[in-house]
C-alpha cells in the first residue's frame, strides 16, 4: 500500500500528464478539452478563504482505522495541488474529534443518513459562512453509513472537497474528467479519488474571481444564511445559526 508521499508523487505525475505542468507548483492550461458541462464542473459553490490552512478532523468512532486511511488519501491529493489551483489553501489531517468542530477553518468528516432516492447522493457538505457570505468559516462532510468501500470513501471525500473549492456537480461530465461526476449509488464510486486536471483549472478560475471581488475577511460572527444553493447544483447545503454555549 502506498504511503502519503508516494500518493502525492503519483498524483503530481498524473497532473503533469493531464495539465502540462512546466514547473513543480503551477499548472498551465490543460491539454485536454475542459469544456464546462462535458469535462469540467461549473464554479459558483462556496469556497474557503485563499491562503489559509484548513484543519481536517474525523468524528471519533464513526470510521475504522482502515476507513480513515481511505479518507486521508483525497485530502492529501487536494492539498498537493494547492499552489497549482492558486487558492493556496492547505489541508491538514489532525486526527479524530469527539464532536463536530465549529472553529475557524475547521472541517469535520462524519457519518450521517443523507441518502436521497432522487439524486442517489451518499454524501454531502454542510458549510457555515462568514458574516453572511459564501466564504466558509467551518464545514462538515457527511457520509452515509452505507458507503463502506475504500473506493467509495475516497471518491466521496474528493467530491465534497471539490465543492469546498467552488465546484458544482457535473452529472453529465465524462467519467474520469472531474471529481464532480455522479456516483453509481452505494455500490460503485465515480472512479475519481482526487482533483483532475480540469478540476485544477476550474478551481483556479474560481479563486481568481474570488480574489477580484473580495476584500480581506474579518471574522466577527457566523451569521445565519438561508441555505439556497447555486444554480445547477443540488447538493444539500445546511447553514444554521451556530449554537451559543
Image (tube, helix red, strand yellow):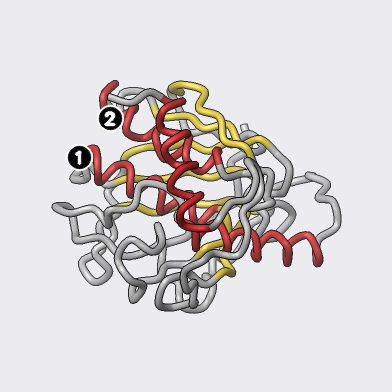
Q: Label 1: how many residues lie within 10 Å, few (<14), some (14-19) or many (20+)?
A: some
In the visual, does 126 lie left or right of 150?
right
Q: Nearer the viewer, residue 20 or 224?
A: 20
Between the residue at mark 1 and the residue at mark 2, the CA separation in whole angstroms equals 8 Å
Look at mark 1 in the image and give the residue it sits on: 148
Q: Nearer the viewer, residue 85 or 237?
A: 85
> Is 164 drawn above or below residue 70 in the view shown?
below
Res. 65 image quadrant: top left
Q: x, y percentage for residue 241?
A: 60, 51
- Picture residue at 51% right of the left edge, 66% below the top: 31
Res. 72 image quadrant: top left
- Picture residue at 63% right of the left edge, 50% below the top: 22
In the visual, does 145 lie left or right of 49?
left
Q: x, y percentage for residue 213?
A: 80, 66
- Picture residue at 35% right of the left edge, 47% below the top: 193
Q: Quadrant of the C terminus?
A: top right
Q: Nearer the viewer, residue 82 or 162?
A: 82
- Picture residue at 33% right of the left edge, 42% below the top: 154
Using the rendered image of the protein, determine whether residue 37 is visible from the camera's viewpoint.
yes
Q: x, y percentage for residue 227?
A: 54, 65
> Is 68 drawn above or below residue 154 in the view shown?
above
Q: Quadrant of the N terminus?
A: top left
Q: Label 2: how many residues lie within 10 Å, few (<14), some (14-19) or many (20+)?
A: some
Q: Earlier in the sequence, mark 1 or mark 2?
A: 2
Q: Nearer the viewer, residue 215 or 37?
A: 37
Marks 1,2: beta carbons within 8 A: yes
Q: x, y percentage for residue 60?
A: 37, 23
Using the rendered image of the protein, determine whether residue 136 is visible from the camera's viewpoint.
no
Mark 2, secondary structure of its residue: helix
Look at mark 2 in the image and give the residue it sits on: 67
Amino acid at each position: 500500500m502506498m504511503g502519503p508521499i508516494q500518493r502525492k508523487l503519483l498524483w503530481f505525475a498524473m497532473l503533469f500528464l493531464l495539465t502540462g505542468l512546466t514547473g513543480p507548483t503551477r499548472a498551465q492550461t490543460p491539454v485536454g478539452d475542459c469544456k464546462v458541462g462535458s469535462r469540467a464542473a461549473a464554479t459558483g459553490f462556496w469556497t474557503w478563504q485563499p491562503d489559509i490552512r484548513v484543519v481536517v478532523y474525523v468524528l471519533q468512532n464513526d470510521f475504522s482505522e482502515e476507513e480513515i486511511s481511505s479518507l486521508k488519501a483525497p485530502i492529501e491529493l487536494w492539498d498537493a495541488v494547492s499552489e497549482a489551483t492558486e487558492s493556496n489553501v492547505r489541508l491538514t489531517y489532525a486526527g479524530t474529534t469527539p464532536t463536530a468542530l465549529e472553529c475557524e477553518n475547521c472541517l469535520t468528516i462524519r457519518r450521517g443518513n443523507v441518502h436521497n432516492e432522487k439524486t442517489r447522493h451518499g454524501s454531502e457538505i454542510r458549510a457555515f459562512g462568514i458574516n453572511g457570505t459564501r466564504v466558509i468559516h467551518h464545514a462538515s462532510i457527511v457520509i452515509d453509513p452505507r458507503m463502506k468501500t475504500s473506493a467509495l470513501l475516497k471518491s466521496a471525500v474528493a467530491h465534497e472537497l471539490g465543492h469546498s473549492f467552488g465546484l458544482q456537480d457535473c452529472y453529465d461530465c465524462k467519467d474520469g474528467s472531474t471529481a464532480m461526476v455522479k456516483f453509481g449509488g452505494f455500490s460503485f464510486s465515480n472512479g475519481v479519488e482526487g482533483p483532475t486536471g480540469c478540476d485544477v483549472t476550474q478551481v483556479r478560475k474560481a479563486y481568481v474571481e474570488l480574489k477580484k471581488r473580495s476584500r480581506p475577511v474579518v471574522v466577527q460572527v457566523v451569521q445565519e444564511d438561508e441555505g439556497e444553493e447555486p444554480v445547477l447544483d443540488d447538493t444539500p447545503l445546511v447553514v444554521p445559526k451556530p449554537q451559543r454555549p
